[in-house]
Image (cartoon, grey):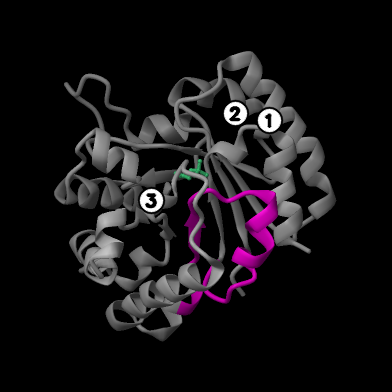
Amino acid sequence: MRKLLIAGNWKMNLVLAEAKSLTGDILSQMERFGDALDFLIIPPYTLLHPLAPAVWGTKLALGAQDLHWEPSGAFTSGISTAMLKDAGCSFVLVGHSERRDHFKDTDAALAMKLRAAIANRVTPIYCIGEHLEDREAGRTEAVLTHQFNTVLKGLAADQIQNCLLAYEPVWAIGTGKTATPEMAQETQCFIRNLLVSEFGEDTAASTRILYGGSVKPENAKELMGQPDIDGALIGGASLTADSFIGIAAAANS
Ligand code: 13P
């Protein structure tokens, strides 16, 4: 019922020639999966418009790493949902830990970003995850509950149906340390139960929750074999077609 989504968050990497070449390689290697998996790339803003013609009409979706909640105006460096759609985006990340930690995105700002994305029909992928000190202090569930409540609580069922979640333990991002499949499953099951309590069984059952944090071809099968892991949000390993498609192949095996 929940099709796996293989999503590559390119972060602040690649220039145009590299991006075109990677996208072309992904498109040609993706064909063998038919409709079995969903695919998404999330490049930096400057690459969105030039990549859009390459992915148009294919099964490779385009997403952005952030947005501004206002539709237009004096917000230097801001990018609105209309601009994202104009550049061919159908997805946008909200609340990535690098936005929270380095750019100080607040819960209130994230709540506005998420609502702007939903209202303008760009599917948000809302990212949550604990720091190492939280996990070690036994605060994982409290942190996730806070991140869930401050941004998702109060949405209507038809709004949350247009969202995805991503669980990304901060200590596993770019560190080579992956949560064990059991640890990721236990945490994602906890997140799904938050969805059940707030939005009911049906919505919780249909909402995809991705896992992110050092996903690679070697660990993808076990991770995505877990019942509450509905895809991967991949950083480093999404920057070459071999590892990105290798993850898809492992997930689909
Ligand atoms: P890595 O796969 O490089 O750990 O990054 C994960 C991530 O932050 C994806 O959004």
Task: Kindly state the secondary structure of the residue where label 1 is placed.
Answer: helix
Task: Kindly state the secondary structure of the residue where label 3 is placed.
Answer: helix
Nearer the observer, 86 or 180 = 180
Distance (Cα) linking label 1 and label 2:
10 Å
Tell me the residue that label 2 is attached to.
52
User: Which of pointers 2 and 3 lies earlier in the amino acid sequence?
Assistant: 2
Under mark 3, the amino acid is: Trp
Tell me the residue that label 1 is attached to.
23
Badge 3 crowding class, 10 Å Cα cut-off, few under 14, some 14 to 19, many 20 or more, is many
Q: Which image quarter: residue 78? A: top left
Q: Which image quarter: residue 224? A: bottom right
What span is in magenta? 205-229
Is 106 magenta? The answer is no
Looking at the image, the residue that sits furthest to the front is: 136
Residue 137 in the image: state x and y as whole percent.
Answer: 23, 66
Is 210 magenta? The answer is yes
Residue 84 in the image: state x and y as whole percent.
Answer: 42, 33
